[in-house]
Image: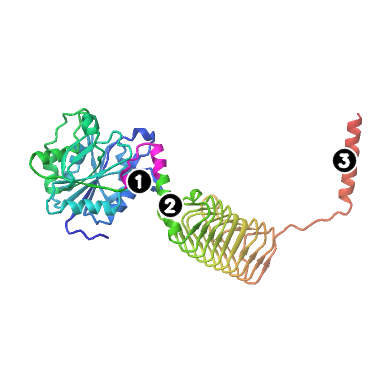
Amino acid sequence: MVEQSTPLAIVVLAAGKGTRMKSDLHKVLHPIAGRPMLEHLLDSAAALAPQRQVVVAGHGREQLERALGSRATIAVQEPQLGTGHAVQQAEAALAGFSGDVLILYGDVPFVSTETMQAMIHRLHAEDSPAVVVLGFEPEDPLQYGRVLAHDDGRIAMMVEYKDASEEQRACRLCNSGLMAVKSADLFGLLARVGNENAQGEYYLVDIVNVATLDGQSCAVIVTPDPGEVGGINSRGELAEAEARWQSRRRIAAMADGATLIAPETVFFAWDTNLGRDVTVEPNVVFGPGVTVANDVTIHAFSHLEGATIETGVSVGPYARLRPGTVLREGSKVGNFVEIKNAELGEGAKANHLTYVGDATVGASANLGAGTITCNYDGYFKHRTVIGERAFIGSNSALVAPVRIGADAIVAAGSTVTRDVGDGELRLVRGEQLVKPGWADRFHDAMKKKKAEKSAS
């Protein structure tokens, strides 16, 4: 948590329709690394301990209300008349607030806490600028608005691309749209912004020009990473943002002591936590909520979500760990095994072709190939408990609720519907019937019948 000497409020603009996404889901709720892009942004801002958070919404505001709950106030912009008009809609939510206001964009999710802090710090510099703008210098400035600034960072003028002259467009310093403003100044400046421009909109950037005409100074700071302020407006840009995030996360994982055999094929979630000396083989996907301790091997083509994996565990290949999975130290989950809401005790093994759902498996227990915990009766889930050192033979079905005792043995091919005591053998099979010579007589009769049919 970063200590703030002045109270802080966050205003996030998220009123755009997101038409280029072609989606019923609000644009800022589309996930990157398994987390809505808006949540990435709010998490970075949370480190600054804002006293108030306001999200300005328009289309799809009901989705934002459900996603955010009481964590932020929703201000409605209807109709959408530009970015300046959008920020004005937050005035009521900020009534009585005295401090700094940080203006962010919900579709610009990767602005770092450090950059936000730098903007606020600049706002309180000795020259006391009225507005601080975050600028960037992309390889191709495209149609971004321009920041015309002096060498010391004081802004002479800001202009949107459509209103800029060719000379102004030659400037390479672009406006990210992010600003820091003192609450005492913000809404007074916005009230004086007009819409005499190519778009007929009320531009947020014009508060800089208004303040400058009043003789107040405004300043720009420049992020060294243009990707930090990249907006996401389409599925293609969403995929590009995902790729950038994954690339950085893979590098960080390896720097922290994990081995990724084919890094470009491994996908992390926003909260994946890997220990040291973890080996991740190709084509592994981590969903949210996975914690992996030291000295673990995740074999190829495995999918993990909501799982806790302790030291020395081996997973996969082709394993699926679903939410609620806990693998204790030294346990093993092999190929084509699915675990859900279940715990495998220390040294327990489910080596292949097994489903373990809603179960507790004791230390050193062994689940043979084809073992299934039958946990669902069509209405309710039921739990299976397997004791320490129990041995479950191949192709066994354990019909929950059921308890298998410590050191018990369930013979291969059994369907177990009643509890098995400690040290017991449970064998549930139909009696084998043997008819000597029956198969030979059957083959002879069928061959004769086939030959007669061919001759006719």
Q: Position of residue 286 (x, y in %)?
A: 47, 53
- Quadrant holding the N terminus: bottom left
- Going 14% across and 38% down the picture, which residue do you hit? 209
Residue at mark 2 to residue at mark 3: CA–CA distance: 61 Å
Q: Position of residue 219 (x, y in %)?
A: 17, 46
Q: Nearer the viewer, residue 320 or 377?
A: 320
- Amino acid under disc 1: Met
Q: Tags 3 and 1 in contact by the CB under 8 Å rule?
A: no
- Amino acid under disc 2: Ala
- Amino acid under disc 3: Met
Residue at mark 2 to residue at mark 1: CA–CA distance: 13 Å
2 or 3: tag closer to the N-terminus:
2
- Is residue 173 found left or right of 240 in the rendered image? left
Is residue 101 one of those drawn in magenta?
Answer: no
Label 1: element kind: helix
- Is residue 263 found left or right of 456 in the rendered image? left
Residue 37 image label: 1
Q: Which residues are magenta?
A: 225-241
Residue 269 image label: 2
Label 3: element kind: helix
Please identify the dominant SS of the magenta region.
helix
Residue 446 image label: 3
- Going 49% across and 63% down the picture, which residue do you hit? 277
Mark 1 packing: few (<14 Cα in 10 Å), some, or many (20+)?
many
3 or 1: tag closer to the N-terminus:
1
Residue at mark 3 to residue at mark 1: CA–CA distance: 68 Å
- Going 58% across and 70% down the picture, which residue do you hit? 388
Look at the image and tell me whether residue 81 can be seen. no
